[in-house]
Amino acid sequence: MNKFILPLAGAAALALGAYLIFKPEPETTPLASSSRPAQGDPIVSVALPDALSPNAQIGKRAFDSVCAACHGENAAGKEGFGPPLVHKIYEPSHHGDMSFLLAAQRGVQAHHWRFGDMPPQEDVTQGDVKAIIAYVRELQRANGIN
């Protein structure tokens, strides 16, 4: 009987460790706990950083003029229009900066969300998009998305 206790305890410890490592992380906090946001409402709640870098400040202005119509104020998404960019789907390890550059340049076929395809954004320069990326990445970091 004693020869089975140590292997069982080891297997239990291994299972617990695997669970803690691979358990799903909670999604970015939805605004409404059980109901879907109304058309045009923000999709997630976004905590703002204490301050933005100079490049991110430029990016915020560009984002507000070009992107916010669909992606919402502070990249919180906009129900019925576009997804939140402050979301773990857009963390740098899944959607790198080049993904954002190509999305603005070429558009994107819908694949994570059901908002339809994103058209190319012909009115923004590559420099604008780089500043927008800086803004979005700073918002993401302020919300625990690294």
Image: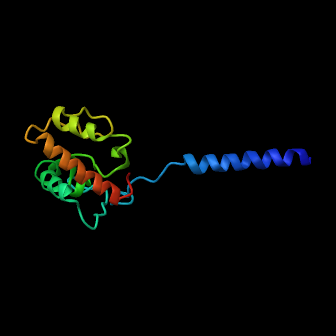
Q: Position of residue 110 (x, y in %)?
A: 27, 35
Residue drawn 16% across the image and 34% down it: 105
* Residue 76 can be seen, yes or no: yes
* Image: 2 above or below 102: below
Q: Is residue 53 left or right of residue 90?
A: left
* Total count of labels: 0
- Front-most of residues 57 and 31: 57
Rendered image quadrant of residue 123 = top left
Residue drawn 19% across the image and 45% down it: 130
* Residue 78 can be seen, yes or no: no
Q: Is residue 66 left or right of residue 23?
A: left
Q: Position of residue 48 (x, y in %)?
A: 28, 64
Q: Position of residue 112 (x, y in %)?
A: 33, 38
Q: Give the color scheme: rainbow, by chain, secondary structure or one colour.
A: rainbow
Residue furthest to the front in view is 54
* Image: 109 above or below 133: above
Residue furthest to the right in view is 1
Residue drawn 14% across the image and 46% down it: 128
Q: Position of residue 22 (x, y in %)?
A: 55, 46
Q: Is residue 102 left or right of residue 3?
A: left
Residue furthest to the left in view is 123
* Image: 103 above or below 64: above
Residue drawn 27% across the image and 46% down it: 83
